[in-house]
Image (spheres, grey):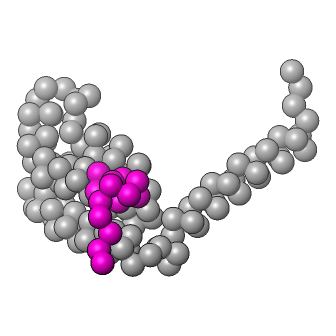
């Protein structure tokens, strides 16, 4: 099967445009007050917890930073994936035993913020009057 270069580039640019559009739609400046507040609270609490973790060990702190960045960008699904990774379930037993407890509060906070956002976006949580 031969792919026409122009067709390939058109598809590539189309995909990129969709990605950029979705990213723009999630941008901070286009969010309502409730969403901005939820992101801000998540970033503050997770940053404090990340600082506590960093005072003990720098192991996997880049993943914690990436999770926080995902929340800033409004990519709650990606943040949740990072939280799952920070449970260390796919690591050796010794690594999991050492680091999973250290990251447990951070992971719980992240998962809680993600769940609240999902509930808020699906209309499950009551809107403030």
Query: Toward the viewer: 94 or 88?
Result: 88
Query: Toward the viewer: 18 or 127?
Result: 127
Q: Quadrant of residue 85?
A: top left
Residue 76 in sight here: no
Residue 38 position, x and y percent, is 31, 69
Q: Is residue 33 left or right of residue 59?
A: right
Check if residue 88 falls in the magenta segment: no
Can you say whether 4 is above or below 42 in the image? above
Residue 18 position, x and y percent, is 67, 54
Can you say whether 34 is above or below 4 in the image? below
Residue 44 position, x and y percent, is 23, 71
Q: Is residue 23 left or right of residue 7?
A: left
Residue 120 in sight here: yes
The residue positioned farthest toward the top in the image shown: 1
The residue positioned farthest toward the front in the image shown: 129
Q: Residue sitting at 13 percent across and 40 percent down? A: 100
Q: Residue sitting at 89 percent across and 26 percent down? A: 2
Quarter of the image with the N terminus is top right
Q: How many marks?
A: 0
Q: Residue sitting at 19 percent across and 26 percent down? A: 92
Residue 110 position, x and y percent, is 25, 54
Q: Is residue 105 left or right of residue 65?
A: left
Q: Residue sitting at 25 percent across and 71 percent down? A: 41
Check if residue 116 falls in the magenta segment: yes
Q: Is residue 29 left or right of residue 59?
A: right
Quarter of the image with the C terminus is bottom left
Magenta segment boundaries in residue numbering: 114-129
């Amino acid at each position: 099967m031969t792919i026409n270069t122009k067709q390939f580039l058109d598809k590539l640019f189309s995909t990129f445009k969709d990605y950029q559009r979705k990213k723009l739609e999630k941008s901070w400046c286009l969010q309502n007050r409730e969403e901005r507040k939820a992101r801000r609270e998540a970033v503050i609490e997770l940053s404090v917890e990340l600082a506590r973790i960093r005072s003990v060990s720098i192991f996997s702190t880049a993943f914690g930073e990436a999770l926080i960045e995902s929340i800033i960008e409004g990519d709650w699904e990606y943040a949740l994936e990072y939280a799952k990774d920070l449970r260390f379930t796919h690591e050796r037993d010794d690594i999991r035993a050492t680091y999973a407890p250290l990251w447990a509060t951070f992971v719980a906070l992240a998962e809680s913020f993600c769940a609240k956002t999902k509930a808020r976006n699906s209309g499950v949580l009551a809107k403030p009057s």
